[in-house]
Every structure is written in structure tokens, then in C-alpha cells.
Image (spheres, rainbow, N blue to C red):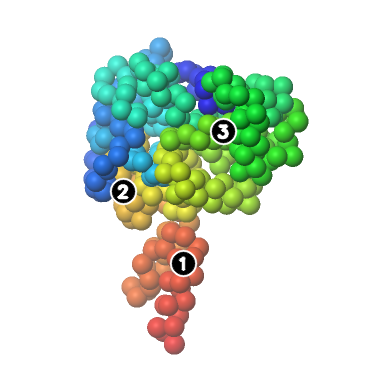
Amino acid sequence: MTDYVHGGSGGAARAHTPVHAHHHVLEQPDSPDEIVRVSCVRHTYEDGAMVHLCGLDFVASRGARVAVLGPNGSGKTTMLFHILGLLRPQEGEVRVLGVAPSEEWKSIRRRIGVVLQNVDEQIIAPTVGDDVGFSPRQYGLPEAEVHERVDAALGLLGIAHLAERVPHNLSGGEKRKVALAGALVMEPELLVLDEPFEGLDPTSRRSLIALLTRLTRERDMTVVMSTHDIDTVPEFADYAYVLAPGGAIALRGTPAEVFASADALAASNIEPPILASLFARLRERDPLAPEPALTVAEAVRALSDWKACEE
């Protein structure tokens, strides 16, 4: 459900010491319609653990699909919690839809959809349909419109048959789809996803990527997503940011630019996608091998062209 998310410092990624990373700047295209900006934010938790999201500004523009990458403890969830106003920056600035979210969340909450990593924290209604309809009812929409929105959201995720089910009895992947339906039911301008592919089988993962891609195009919706699923990033994201341990924003660029920066990825303990590693190994053995491809379609074309050239 999008109106309110349960959360706090306990679910945030943590780091023990800040690091001063070498920052690789791959310029983002001009962003005339900026939806999110995080500028050098610091947060210290009660146990003394500190995350310092500094080095490069994090920016997400309207209609963009932005991935946030980094090892455990780098501050990915901390960044998302600041974007959602669940944490207030002790230093620096966060702007979402033109306001500081920790101070003016009520003015923007209807325009934002959220799926947290632990979806059990945000699925609390007795049935799936009731849970997806929670936000529209909270906003006082007519019951007929609530039902229309719920049916549309469940249909988008292909889970209309679950409407009367008890959420507690669903699988992890089904619960994640229910949470996403609740996040989409108000047709948000900004969708924030924390590890959205966790618990999904390959078919559901591909379907989710296709759905989010379609919604960003049709609705001009912005998606900010943290993920450990590196191989999904080239298929989904227009832009990616890499966090180093401690929260330093060390690298930004398109997926092709980011995954070509081997040293910066290694410093952040991130393995490149399998296809990128494969093509890198090919070029080590044969300098005439094709440039790295990041998607299956690109790999098929590159290898077919390479084979044709050698025949």
C-alpha cells in the first residue's frame, strides 16, 4: 500500500566506516524535469553506524528508470528511506517532487508508490483486494472508483485471481506482486522499489521488467530501484548509480558505461553481469572479439556478426 510504509533504521543498510572513494563521473544527460535529488546526505544510526551518501549527487528525472547498486552496508536502503521521508538528513539535502520529503511527505505521498524489501511489513489487510484498495480508500475515493483501480492494478500484475485470498497464505513472489499492485493503484509519478526481483521466478522477473518499462513510457513514471540482481540492470535501467561501502556515490552512468568501469565496480565489491564477463574473457583470448554486450539480444547480434566476419 502506498499511503504509508512501515519502516525505520532497523531495515536500513548500514556501514561501519565511511570511505573516500575515487569518484567516476559519467555525465547524466540534462534533466529538465528532475523528480529526485540526493545531495551529500549523512545519517548516523543510534548504534553509531554512519552512512555518508556523498561524492556525486543522485538524480532521477521524469520517466527514467534508475538502478542503485552496491554491496550490503553501502547505504542503498538508507538512500531510499531518505527519498521516502522515513529518515531526515543530518547533513545535505533531499528533494523529491520539489520538496523535502521528511518535512512535507503529506503533500507528495499520493504521487509516490513504494515497495519495500520486506513486503510483509506493508501487506496488512485481510484480503489481497482490501490491501490493494487501502490507499484509494484512505484518500476518500468513491467505492466504485476504488474497485476500478483495484481491478486495474491486479490485472496489470496478472493476479486478479488472488483478490479474495488471504495475503499471509501467499508465496513470497505473490506477496511481492500484491505489494506492487498496491504501489501502482494510485498511478504514481514516482515508484520506489527495494529489491523488487527478490523471490520472483525468471518468468515473473521478465514480466515485471516489461511492465515497468511499459509504465514508464505510457505514464512518464519515474522508477528508482535498488537491486542485487546485476544481470537484470541492463535489461531494465536507463541509468545506474554505484555506492561504495560507507555510502559514497562512486559511479554513475548508463549500464554500458557503469559495467565498463571494472576498477570502480571492483572497489564496490560488485561483479559485472555474466555477459559482460563473458565478452571480456573473449577479448582477452582474441583482440578481434566483439565489444561487450549486456543483453541476450545484443550478445546474439554481436556473436553472429563476429562469426560472419570470420567465415
| Picture disc at residue 185 | 3
Residue 1 image offset from top left, x and y in percent: 57, 26
Q: Quadrant of residue 173?
A: top right
Dot 1: element: helix
| Picture disc at residue 177 | none
* Alpha carbons under labels 3 and 1: distance apart: 37 Å
The residue to which callout 2 is attached is: 253
The residue to which callout 1 is attached is: 299
What's the amino acid at mark 3? Val
Residue 11 image offset from top left, x and y in percent: 50, 23
Q: Earlier in the sequence, mark 3 or mark 2?
A: 3
Q: Residue at x 45, y 72 (%)?
A: 301
Residue 250 image offset from top left, x and y in percent: 29, 39
* Alpha carbons under labels 3 and 2: distance apart: 31 Å
* Alpha carbons under labels 1 and 2: distance apart: 21 Å
Dot 3: element: loop
What's the amino acid at mark 1? Ala
**In the shown orientation, is residue 199 left or right of residue 20?**
right
- Judged from this view, the residue extending furthest toward the top is 46
